[in-house]
Amino acid sequence: MNKFTSIIEKCAETGLYVGYVPGFPGAHSQGETLDELNRNLQEVLSMLLEDGEPSLEAEFVGTQVVMVA
C-alpha cells in the first residue's frame, strides 16, 4: 500500500475541489465533494503506479503562515 500527501484547494470559479500530489507529475484531479476528489485521486494514482514506482520531483514538507504588515 502506497501513501501520498495531496494538496487540496477549492476553485472559486467552478466550486470544485482540486487536488494534486506535490512532485508527482500527472497526479492531479478534481471533484464536487472531498470524497469524490479522494476517489478520483486514488484512481489517477493507481493508473500512474502501473508504470512502476514514481521518482518524485519534490516532497511535501508542510505549510507555513507568513505575516505581512
Image (spheres, rainbow, N blue to C red):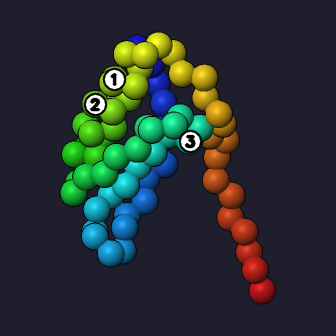
Q: Residue at coordinates 67% horizontally, 41% vertically from top-left?
A: 61
Amino acid on which the number 2 mark rests in the picture: Glu
Amino acid on which the number 3 mark rests in the picture: Pro
Rate crowding at label 3 as few (under 14), some (14 to 19) or many (20 or more) other CA atoms within 10 Å.
some
Rate crowding at label 1 as few (under 14), some (14 to 19) or many (20 or more) other CA atoms within 10 Å.
few
Q: Secondary structure at mark 3?
A: loop
Q: Which quadrant holds the C terminus?
A: bottom right
Could you say which disc has been placed on residue 7 in the image?
none
Q: Nearer the viewer, residue 68 or 9?
A: 9
Q: Which residue is mark 3?
A: 22
Spatial separation of the CA atoms under disc 3 and disc 2: 17 Å
Do the residues under discs 2 and 1 have CB atoms within 8 angstroms?
yes
Spatial separation of the CA atoms under disc 2 and disc 1: 5 Å
Q: Which residue is mark 2?
A: 43
59 vs 19: above or below: above
Spatial separation of the CA atoms under disc 1 and disc 3: 16 Å
Q: Residue at coordinates 61% horizontally, 29% vertically from top-left?
A: 56
